[in-house]
Amino acid sequence: MTKNLAPIDRIGRVVLGVVAAFSLLLLVAPSLIVVAISFEPRGFIAFPPSGFSLRWYEHVFANRQLTDSVVVSLWVSLAVAGITLALGVPAAFASVRGTFAGKAAANAFLLAPQMMPGMVIGIASLFFGAYFAFRASNAMLILALSVFCLPFVIRIAMARLAGLDPRLDEASANLGAGKLETFVRVTLPQLGPALVAAAAFTFIEAFDNVTVALFTSDVRGRPLPVELYYLVQYDSTPAIAAISALEIGLSFAIMLVLARTVGLERLGR
Amino acid sequence: MSSAPLLRRILHGRGIWPAVPALAYLFVFLALPMLTLLAFGFVTIDRGRIVADTWTLGYLEAALADDLVWRLMWRSFWVAAVSSVLTLLLAYPVAYLFAEAKGIWRTLILVAVVSPLLTSALVRAYAWIVILGGRRGLVNQTLLSLGLIEQPLRILNTDWAVLIGMTQIHLPFMILPLLAVLAERDRRLEEASLNLGASQTGTFFRVVVPMSVPAIFAGLALVFAVSYTNFIVPQLLGGGSYSTLAVQVYEQTIVVLDWTRGAVLATILLSTCFAFVLAIVAFGNRLARWNESAA
């Protein structure tokens, strides 16, 4: 079928292939360039780097303000992943299996944060807190980021739950297991991979997020993205490339775990 | 009352109970803050507190009468519109290729598409500063050494840099919905079209593309929304004096600390964003219906 292509088809195929190759290059090249630059031995950025050194990594690890911000970000992300799982997974159960009145409205409200830009959630939280005399703080950041990330967890859990066979639960009940036992030994194990994916995705999102964080985070003890934002705005030393490369490395490690446990194709949906 | 029946009801009932904590959380930490944001645009704010008896439509009217607001809104709009269309043109071939690809190629394409999602937008904006910036920038270095240009091009701190950055950063959002639809499509229609003598290119434009119209417009709406409200990319790649409506919202709230103005502009940003997105979705639905009636 593809052997004797009409000229227009051949041109069409070539155009399609060239554009696709360009897009794929566009997707991965910037990250690769950042990683390459981070090994620059000199004091300014250049590509390709003039040599290989880990000097900027040492610089990053010696910078107390940066390492502190990494620790803050790790705690914030863990807290956000915990809160969103605790709230989101039960909510997904009601969304998929529930048969209550007003279910459509409840589902729409549960997914509403995904229609809000991070900036709007950040500003709204800042103003709401200020109304009760709460200043921007990392506690506020955790609360606001949890709003922002909740739909990711709910959507991933909903997709998995909708694919479960309810007959397994029935079989478990028929064989004499109680409701709680069925939940713990039948339902939960099937959900496991989806929960891992949801937690990992939320963790990365919270760790990388700057749009919410700029408005809600503490002035002292800033999280990494905010620290990085001010650095990028006023400077472009290879140190930023080194931090970025570390972030990219962390994300890839998490993605590898995800690819093993759930498969990449499920992530986007 | 023992806790066992309650637990049972929560675990296996068909009721709303399991969703109540999440709904309550969103009511307190999303709905109420959004109302506060809206309200702050209509009152005088002093150190984060509403000054009593200062309710007025004046701030909103002043913003709507301000030329600058309209100019910034126009820039936000066209940058988001152009970048969404560019994203579509770049995304479609990738999604199509993915649908045709097999085995390891599929995995590689998928990794290329998903991996940028896992690196922060900040890191990618920084990458573009490195690539586009100044004489040492990658683009200028290459073009200068090839002798294609005599003087370094000024790309960073222009509309171009903002467009390039936005398009690249939002590309996965467009590819992913297309990928799902194109990979799972029913290929019998295409075979019928080819058997009836249509060319492959003709079949692509008359059968495959129309079939993916809903996904195309879902992607367009999403990319438009995230581009229209993005304030990081314009700030970092557009330079210090470059502004959009979203950048203004940030500056008024965080730099100028004029919260009333920030609230008014945020409200305008959000409501115009919703209006544009609804228009894109409505147009997409109309096109999909027109396709069906034409088929």
Image (cartoon, coloured by chain):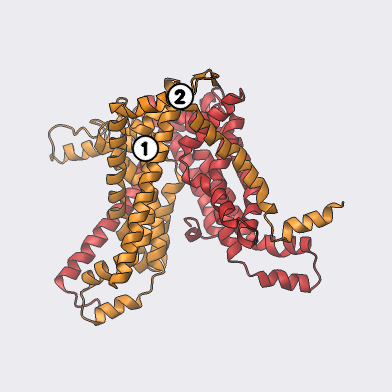
Residue A55 appears anywhere in the view: no
**Residue at the (59%, 37%) spot, across then down:** B29
Secondary structure at numbered mark 2: loop
**Above-or-below relation of A110 to A209:** below
Q: CA distance from mark 1 to mark 2?
A: 40 Å
Write down the chain letter for disc 2. Answer: B
Write down the chain letter for disc 1. Answer: B
Q: What's the amino acid at mark 1?
A: Ala
Q: Residue furthest bottom?
A: B195
Q: Colour of chain B?
A: orange
Label drawn at residue B291 = none
Viewed as shown, does residue B275 lie left or right of B71? Answer: right
Residue B294 appears anywhere in the view: yes
Occupied quadrant, residue A194: bottom right
Dot 2: few (<14), some (14–19), or many (≥20) neighbours within 10 Å? few
Location of residue B12 in the rendering, given as x and y in whole percent from the top left corner: 73, 61
Dot 1: few (<14), some (14–19), or many (≥20) neighbours within 10 Å? many
Occupied quadrant, residue B110: bottom left
Q: Closer to the N terminus: mark 1 or mark 2? A: 2
- Of residue A147 and residue B31, the one placed in the foreground of this image is B31
Secondary structure at numbered mark 1: helix
Q: What's the amino acid at mark 2?
A: Thr
Occupied quadrant, residue A241: top left
**Residue at which label 2 appears:** B56
Q: Colour of chain A?
A: red
Location of residue A47 in the rendering, given as x and y in whole percent from the top left corner: 30, 37
